[in-house]
Amino acid sequence: MTMKRTSPPVWLALLAAVFFLLASPLAAQEPAEPATGEEQAGDEGAEEEEKPPIPAGAELRVSPTELTLEVGDKATLTATVVDGDGEAIEGIDVVFFSRNRRRLGVNPAGEVEAHGPGDVQVIALVPKEAEDEPRRAEALLRVEVEVTIPNPPVESVEIVGLPGAFYSGTHLTLQARVVDITDVVRDNVEVAWSSSNTDVAVPDGFGGLDLLAPGRATLTATAEDATSQVDIQVARNPTEHLELTASADEARTGDVVRFEAVGRDDSGNEVEDLPIRFLVAGQSATGILAPGATAQIEQDGAFVAERSGIYTVTALGGSHSASVPVRVTPRRVNKEIEFVGQGKVSDRRTSDLWVWEGTDGRDYAITGTWGAEGHAYIWDVTNPESIVLIDAVRVDARTVNDVKVSEDGRVAVISREGASDRKNGFVVLDVSEPQVGVRILSRFDDQLRGGVHNVFIHDEHVYALSNGRRFDVISIEDPTQPYRVGRFELDTPGHSIHDIWVVDGVAFSSNWDDGVVAIDVGGAGMGGAPNNPVQLGSYAYPSGWNHAAYPYRSESTGEFYVFAGDEAFPYGELGRDPRAAPPRAAGWIHVISWDDWENPREVARYQVPEAGTHNLWIEDDIMYVAYYNGGLRVVDVSGELRGDLYQQGREIGMFMPYDPDALVPNSPFVWGPQPYKGHIFFSDWHSGLWAVKLKDPEDPNRIIGEPH
Amino acid sequence: MHMSTRRQPRTAALSTLLLAFGVFTGSALHAESDLTPPSREYYAYVCAESEDQVALVRFGPSGIEVTKTITVGSFPAETEGPHGINISPGGRYWYVSIAHGNPFGSIHKYETGTDEWLGDVQVGMFPATLDVAATTGLLFVVNSDFYGDHVPSTISVVETSTMTEIAQFESGTMPHGARFSRDGRKLYSANMMDDELVEIDALRFEVGRRLKLGRTGHSAGGHARHAGHEDTAAGHGAHGQPSVEPSWVTPPTSGGMVYVTALSGNAIYEVDTGAWKVARRLETPAPGPYNAAVAPDERLLVVTYKKGDSVGFWDLDEGREVARVSTTRRIPHGVAITSDGRFSLVTVEGVGGEPGVVEVYDNGAFRRVAQIDIGKQAGGIALWERN
């Protein structure tokens, strides 16, 4: 920095004087607006009372010093400031607050009310004086009061889920429903089980019941002081033999084999309500050393193996058992992924992509940019070996996070975030003639100014996220004049939305803690329409990481799945310090079986260790996953899906887009994939647009990674 | 809204001249013809809202530099938006508001110097300005909810030792700006979409008094207009729409005066917090006064003109602007004055991919003496007395 002495020229001072004369009437004025008086609220009593000084050595005493309250109870804390002689000083302000106001409320008078169970600290403090030194952010006096709020007593326990018949020699899993006096269903209360006749039925101490012999017994469940009893009549197990059948005797790793067991009596009739337990044991193929757990069978009879070998599935029905072996062979779907071309973007981050066939028959891609200058890039990808940037559109934004193209390939929509005037929304582009040029048709930001993170185009409507809270439906029938026709917002506390995908008139939104929500916008026959979205169902999972969702009906089974992707940063402490390494994500793909809107079930996962998912695409029973640091992953999702797809050897291939000239060199951070006409296009945050393709491995017997 | 439509163009023209030649307009606050280099170093933590970074900027005898850049937030692939920043009294910690979450924003605590992350707490929608009371240790942050439907929003209270939100109470529609009285018993904030200044009872966690500055009432319902910071045409002040959009309030002076910038009203309100009334309404010759700071001698007020791309220096004794300087880029945002009163540090957001800027102005000469680029959309700024 340099500074030098300068003197203003005389004429400049004169100019200043002229300005002063002209401008001064504009400056200081008496308030001309309704700025005083009539609409002031609460100004009565504004006079500050003189506060007595607080001498050194003063002490804040709060009574009681600790407290136990039942839920719903109230009490009052009394605070007194005393001087060094123990004499109370009147007129001192004491501030009360609770460290968990959802469990325990406290008002300025120190009155507390217990709302929920837990241990909560109430803080009482006396502020310092304004001129007290050191001027450090702390109170003069401070006391903590520990308040214990025990769980409400259990009001009832109910034995549920018992079968219609009980047979000796079988084993049951017991279930109980516990409700406390506040009508809350509790899952944190230990339930003790006992039997009046342990010669007939005896609890196993782990929530199960062994039925030993025919006879009567009273089964008792006890939760705190509540009990419930059920009389059971245990009959002789009429089963003479078990029949165990398998849907196949040979399968590949990852294939689900269905087992079914039926007990038959001496007449050959099926024994109703016979509890069946499935077990699996076996030997993985030689050459797979220390394989760990290699196969699983769920109690609905679904078997799947992660490693090849010979497995034996056994069904138990009381003292009867039946076993069936199954041979599992390696899945052998692995291919190589070879580089085809790259549209390099190394001066800024690249966000999402969309590839489409233009009206001129050529192939194009549009990519967004992230944290930059608001560009969307248009590429000619007709020859993926030579990806050519043919146009760029710039809007007032810092991030164009999402890009989508209409079904007819004529209109694109790009989202805006970080607009300089904080008016975000989306921009509609004419992409009907990319070779001639892409032009802006319209902008839409009404009630979308908080930033549109993701959009989707379906049947001449844009589904646009608004401020992470809801999605709005905007007609682009006339793309030059978009207008809103509907919106959808959850009503759960603290709800948030991150992504949306629409297929066949059903929208699937991704909502973090609220998980995936299915909404009829005209295709589900539940009365929904773009102007009247109707919720069909939802599925949430505990982590609250739901970031994306891809609905897909399996071509091989016809089963309808939603593949729900996580986004989770950081991966533990990995990537928290950007000086040490690029960011690293956690998270995986949750496979949700959703043929019944009201009964979604999570049945499988695809999880790559030490990496995290972003966007995904599924086509022809192949899933393409942008796995951030884990690169591009291509996964076989044919057939019924159960268990851990990664461990089952379903991964077809992976590609790490290393680029020494990238924005961050050699740091793959794959954002979004799209299969298209035999190639796989994907965007990488650090290096732009890529095209790759699958090819058969040169040596099919060559094993990379874990053998299956 | 009171506005002189005839005078404004003349002022603007003169302003252009003034800006072009860098003059001042004569005042008890004499512009010094010479520039004295700083004799000490000053440090400021500065938010780059569209970069998810906080820059530590040093300005001193050797010039200006970014000594460190701290990445904030948790999601590198989502822009989380650090907006407001402040240093705890005593200088041991800095706190930054992260605007975006799922959906709620958060406050993060760092140690000054080491810039080690110490904790965070979720608060309300789009938390923005924050301040820490020296007398209680409690942090108050306004949940501005810039982008939501225009319904009343809240102020969160955070116990900083445990980073626990201990209260959240309704303040008004789009609260912005938050500064404590020196005794920490009152917090002043502006409800932009309600055209009002509020005085918060910081010991009871509730609004104590409201002072109407424009024509919009404290509305329980949503407003028809869903803008963030857009222009408001003169005369638009019907119920439900703000007429002046108060955007910032300075801490009370020793005499109990606070200064409220009116983004759309193009005015600065001098409010007597004792009498709880507007003492003076100072029309600004440049549009969009956004943030402001009062110098320690309480004679100088420095104002950023968000829509005027300039910084104004006001003589508070005379109640008029004595100098104005164009910023190097568009959209000036925050301003902080050094404890010795010599310099004003101003943030400039920039547009699109432009870097944000920290500009340093000599408060004696009313001239820019240094500038440095930081990450995009420079916004909140807090001076740190390192020693």
Image: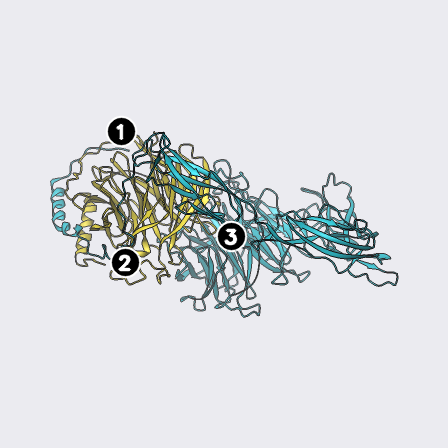
Chain colours: A cyan, B yellow
Q: Residues within 10 Å of mark 2 (few under 14, many from 20)?
A: many
Looking at the picture, tell me which residue is in the foreground, A116 or B251. Answer: A116
Is disc 3 in the same subunit as disc 2?
Answer: no
Q: Residue B243 carries which label?
A: 2
Looking at the picture, tell me which residue is in the foreground, A700 or A302. Answer: A302
Give the quarter of the figure containing the N terminus of chain A. Answer: top left
Give the quarter of the figure containing the C terminus of chain A. Answer: top right
Q: Position of residue A206 (x, y in %)?
A: 71, 46
Q: Residues within 10 Å of mark 1 (few under 14, many from 20)?
A: few
> Which quadrant holds residue B165?
top left
C-alpha gap between disc 3 and disc 2: 52 Å
The label nearer to you, 3 versus 2, is: 2
What residue sits right under mark 1 in the picture?
A: B39
For the residues bearing labels 3 and 2, Cβ distance under 8 angstroms:
no
Q: Position of residue B57 (x, y in %)?
A: 35, 36
The label nearer to you, 3 versus 1, is: 1
- Is residue B376 at all visible to an observer of this figure? no
Kindly identify which chain the residue marked by label 1 belongs to: B
- Kind of element beneath mark 1: loop
Kindly identify which chain the residue marked by label 3 belongs to: A
- Is residue A610 at all visible to an observer of this figure? yes
For the residues bearing labels 2 and 1, Cβ distance under 8 angstroms:
no
Q: Which mark is residue A387?
A: 3
Horizontal side of A438 relative to B370 (left or right) equals: right
The three-letter amino acid code for the residue at tag 1 is: Ser
- Kind of element beneath mark 2: loop
Query: First in sequence: mark 2 or mark 1?
Result: 1
> Which quadrant holds residue A477?
bottom left
C-alpha gap between disc 2 and disc 1: 44 Å
